[in-house]
Image (tube, grey):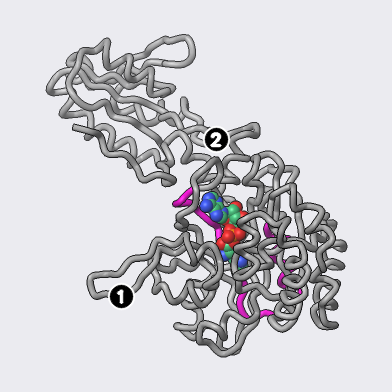
């Protein structure tokens, strides 16, 4: 029978990789706690309308990348392509924004029907961080400092920060008109994708990676030149705060984002070490979104980190965490010994918290069981045979050092293990 495989673009994270994920997630939790952010766990499925209204009808995500279906009741639902909309929906629904701000985070899978390639998947994971209800550039700066601290704590180097300011909806509208006028004058030179976007989402043309368009885009009008005084002051204050904290950044006037809800500051952290999929984190301010999805107007800002991309960077560095080898492997030979093995193992786990003890399972000869013990990477083997059962003793074999073995009274085995194992290792 033909074996069933995973869905294209959705990959298993195998046991050999989960220690890296664990390190990333634990470090993120730790850093976020240091800034007073709280974990939110929203559902993975939401009403499609939520993403239409927030991410935007004219975006690639909503136009062609969502996993959308009708449930048995005919309700139109989607697997979330991102998490900002869910955080805002939850905050409005539970009244968390009444008179106060909320600092939230979530880690989990997102779904986009994109063309799978290295660093781009159909199921991928984000760390999503949102600060709702804060208007000032200080919280934009806090988010950037938080992300910079995360990179430092993970030992990641060489990430570049790019910033831009998109201004209010009104500024974006008038900039959009200017840009369309300019690009329409060069329409023959635009590629198919850009010509299509000219009518639907012209700002995204600025993001084109096509080198043939570079000269046209470099001479295009810049949104930073269209900002009003408030937006300009906000952006300048943010830059001054980053300067004061020694965060290096580049203002990239062509940085636009693939989601429609942004107003004001936008930013991305980019690496050159992952080929085409270099953006490891992106975000910005979305002061209109709370109102657009039905809440009382409230400012907001946030970012999301692409965890697959960060894991790839961590794996290319030194000091990659490997799956933990057990401290000890308990093997029992003979019916009586096998019966006693789990009782002994449970007693040892009771008195030695932190002990990783693998108990041999299934039938087999002693030699074969020893081979499995060796392959497990355990430092010690605990051998329980008929003689040992009769004498109330256990044979303890050093699997990594000189291979020597000693016979230990059962009553003393816990003490002996305590002395032989480094539990912090
Ligand atoms: P985004 O730029 O669409 O923003 O995604 C953030 C990050 O998720 C990207 O920089 C990238 O690292 C990762 N990512 C996106 N798509 C994929 C994919 N198909 N495969 C692997 N990684 C991917 C957002 O999602 C916004 N919600 C961020 C935000 C939060 N803005 C404000 N708050």
User: Is 69 situated above or below 354?
Assistant: below
Q: How many marks?
A: 2
Q: Is residue 55 toward the left or the right of residue 191 in the image? A: left
Q: Which mark is residue 321?
A: 2
Rendering quadrant holding ligand 1: bottom right
Residue at 38% x, 17% y is 374
User: Is 245 situated above or below 53?
Assistant: above
Image quadrant in which the N terminus is located: top left
Residue range in magenta is 121-147
Residue at 12% x, 22% y is 335
Q: Is residue 43 toward the left or the right of residue 130 in the image? A: left
Residue at 45% x, 51% y is 122
In this view of the protein, can residue 342 be seen by the observer?
yes
Q: Which mark is residue 368?
A: none
Q: Is residue 354 toward the left or the right of residue 268 in the image? A: left
User: Is 347 situated above or below 49?
Assistant: above
149 and 75: which is toward the camera: 75
Tell me the crowding category of disc 2: few under 14, some 14 to 19, or many 20 or more residues within 10 angstroms, Cα based: some
Q: Which circle's residue, 1 or 2, is located before the other in the chain?
A: 1
Residue 53 in percent (x, y) is at 51, 77
Give the labeled residue for mark 1. 75
In this view of the protein, can residue 30 be seen by the observer?
no
Residue 137 in percent (x, y) is at 76, 74
Residue 27 in percent (x, y) is at 59, 51
């Amino acid at each position: 029978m033909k074996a069933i495989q995973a869905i294209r673009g959705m990959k298993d994270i195998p046991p050999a990789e989960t220690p890296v994920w664990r390190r990333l997630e634990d470090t993120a939790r730790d850093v976020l706690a240091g800034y007073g952010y709280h974990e939110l766990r929203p559902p993975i499925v939401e009403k499609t309308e939520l993403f239409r209204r927030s991410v935007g009808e004219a975006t690639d995500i909503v136009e062609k990348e969502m996993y959308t279906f009708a449930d048995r009741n005919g309700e139109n639902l989607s697997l979330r392509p991102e998490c900002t909309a869910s955080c805002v929906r939850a905050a409005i629904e539970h009244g968390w924004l009444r008179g106060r701000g909320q600092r939230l985070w979530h880690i989990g899978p997102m779904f986009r029907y994109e063309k799978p390639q290295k660093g781009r998947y159909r199921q991928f994971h984000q760390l999503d961080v949102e600060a709702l209800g804060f208007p000032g550039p200080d919280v934009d700066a806090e988010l950037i400092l938080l992300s910079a601290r995360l990179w430092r704590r993970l030992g990641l180097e060489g990430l570049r920060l790019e910033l831009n300011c998109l201004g209010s909806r009104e500024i974006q509208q008038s900039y959009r008109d200017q840009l369309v006028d300019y690009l329409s004058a060069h329409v023959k030179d635009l590629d198919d994708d850009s010509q299509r976007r000219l009518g639907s989402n012209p700002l995204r043309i600025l993001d084109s990676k096509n080198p043939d368009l570079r000269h046209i885009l470099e001479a295009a009008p810049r949104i930073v030149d269209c900002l009003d005084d408030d937006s300009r002051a906000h952006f300048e204050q943010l830059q001054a705060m980053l300067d004061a904290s020694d965060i290096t950044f580049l203002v990239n006037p062509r940085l636009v984002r693939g989601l429609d809800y942004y107003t004001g500051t936008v930013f991305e952290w980019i690496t050159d070490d992952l080929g085409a999929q270099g953006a490891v984190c992106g975000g910005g301010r979305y002061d209109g979104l709370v109102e657009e999805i039905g809440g009382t107007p409230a400012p907001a800002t946030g970012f999301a980190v692409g965890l697959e991309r960060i894991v790839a960077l961590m794996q290319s560095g030194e000091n990659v965490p490997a799956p933990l080898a057990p401290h000890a492997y308990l093997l029992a030979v003979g019916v009586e010994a096998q019966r006693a093995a789990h009782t002994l193992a449970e007693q040892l786990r009771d008195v030695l918290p932190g002990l990783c003890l693998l108990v041999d399972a299934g039938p087999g000869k002693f030699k074969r069981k020893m081979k499995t013990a060796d392959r497990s990477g355990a430092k010690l083997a605990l051998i329980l045979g008929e003689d040992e059962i009769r004498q109330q003793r256990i044979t303890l074999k050093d699997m990594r050092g000189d291979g020597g073995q000693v016979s230990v009274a059962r009553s003393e085995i816990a003490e002996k293990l305590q002395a032989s194992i480094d539990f912090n290792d």
